[in-house]
Image (cartoon, rainbow, N blue to C red):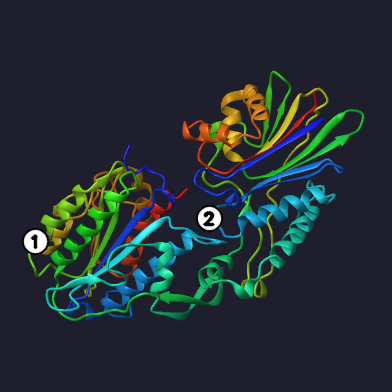
Amino acid sequence: MSYESEISRRKPGLFIFLVDQSRSMSKKISGGKHSKAQEAADAINRQLNEIISRCTKSDGVRPYFDVGVIGYGYKSGDATGLISDQPIPINELESHILRMEKKTENIDGEDIEIEFPVWFDPVASYDTPMVKGLTIAKQWIDDWVQRNPDSFPPVLINISDGGATDGNPKDVADQIMEIGTSDGKTLIWNCHISEKNEKSVSFPKDETEVPEEKHAREMFEMSSVIPDSMLAIAKEEYQNVDTGARAYVYNANLEDLIRLLDIGTRVVYNKVK
Amino acid sequence: MSIKTLNFSKAGNRQEESEDSLAINSERERYSVCDGASDSIFSGWWASCLAGEFVDGDYNLDSGEEYFKMLLNARKKWYSGINWNRLQWNVKNKSIRGSYCTFMGVQLVRDDSLYCNAWAVGDSCFFIDDGNRLQSFPVSSPEDFGVHPDLVWSGYGHPMNERKEYVPEYKVKAFKPEIENCKRIVLATDALSKYILENGVESIDRIWENSGSREFFDKLRSNGSIKNDDISAIIISFS
């Protein structure tokens, strides 16, 4: 059986988030009020907070997950770890908080002011060295799998608004998708975010479902097939998701971005015992 | 009549991390097991407050009014036991939504014969073993242990409690069997209950004999006979 391993302190899971920091990320995301860079950073910061919340018990945060965030394009042709230079246990994220921000959250109809941590700020600077970003991720995953050979397989979520400017990312993505634990291969989820108000393509099964643009097809090919054991959760949000669907949303607006992050992480939370 | 109890945390967790709670008041002959939901925070503490409140009170849970009274008293204890001003941001954010647990409470009643009142919310179970036959309540088949059992809610944590009133739901199931000639009765949380339903009355003999052995239960969990979860039970033997 694949993608069935329990996640525990002895067998933690791994989340790696990759985020595009190229200049075009400064444009406003479709369906949102802010830039793609801002919304992507907010969404990942929120997701890190959610992972911490899932692991929080009354005695503190239990290290059920290791996490890492990689940004690419903050300077020409370069990529780097945004919180740490390798994945760290979730309970160590506390010491990497940039600042706390007060935000209003609606709980059962009441607006409550809550303090949320921010680990990294949005950047929209240069080009799109996605290959460099994926290469760092590959190194992180390689090292992690050596230490955690029987864990639930790593999950990599890549958020970008365009094609790589430093080569073909499919090659390194293929290599990453070949790295796995005894429970399955690494899963790559891709979210192509857009400033255009065009219909998104969610979890396509066939490449002809996405436009004939080079980077659209590339990202399709470098997205994992969603394992059957995870399809049910994807179907809760997108009813047309079928066996063989890729973990990919093309032309995603803000809502699609949030939903993809939710699906990609929630399927793994359910394995925590 | 003799009583044995067991409460073992899931494999890989420390004993103090068990979110199951059991309580006994021998004088009142009231017994309770509650299973704190791992998705919520302070749920082990909530399970302990609820089990304790049931056994130390006289609540007849056939009455919604009595049930709400029990919950309000348990909630007071739960709320006052948490130092809300000293919580770290992540604990604070999570605790706003309150805690959840299942509930099983049993009261022995000695009248012309011996019978009992059993009240349940969720999938913690009550078993009657007459030596040959097993009766169970409220779950009757191993397949019926779901991922989302009914739960008892503590109400909101701080500061939501200042904005919204605690309005609990009445989801209690009741069972009133005669137990005059039974050998044993058992209150157990879901993982052990499922094992009992799958293996019949003999499994209760094994649990009785090994109630003090964490090793015995660890073995059952590692070979897949019991899922890796906190397990707890109160076993009352009449023989």
Quadrant assignment, res B155: bottom right
Mark 2 lies on a secondary structure that is loop
- Left or right of residue A261: residue A204: left
Vertical order, B170 against B161 (above or below): above
Q: At which x and y percent is residue A224?
A: 23, 51
Residue found at the very far right of the displayed protein: B112
* B85 horizontally vs A116: left or right: right
Q: Disc 2 vs disc 1: Cβ atoms closer than 8 Å?
A: no
Which residue is at the front of the view, A7 or A224? A7
Q: B82 or A149: which is nearer to us?
A: A149
Dot 1 crowding, Cα within 10 Å, few <14, some 14–19, many 20+: some
Can the viewer see residue A41?
Answer: yes
Disc 1 target residue: A168
Do the residues at discs 2 and 1 belong to one chain? no
User: Which residue corresponds to the image point at 83% horizontal and 32% vertical from the top-left?
Assistant: B115
Please tell me whether mark 1 sits on a helix, a strand or a loop: loop
Q: Is residue A225 left or right of residue A39?
A: left
Give amino acid for label 1: Asn
Identify the chain of the residue marked 1, using the numbered disc in the image.
Answer: A
Q: Quarter of the image holding residue A15?
A: bottom left
Q: CA distance from mark 2 to mark 1?
A: 42 Å
Q: What residue is shown with label 2?
A: B39
Expressed as whole percent of the image width and height from the top left, the position of residue A251 reads: 22, 66
Mark 2 crowd level (few <14, some 14–19, many ≥20, 10 Å Cα): some
- Residue nearer the viewer, A149 or B133: A149
Residue at x-position 9% and y-position 60%: A212
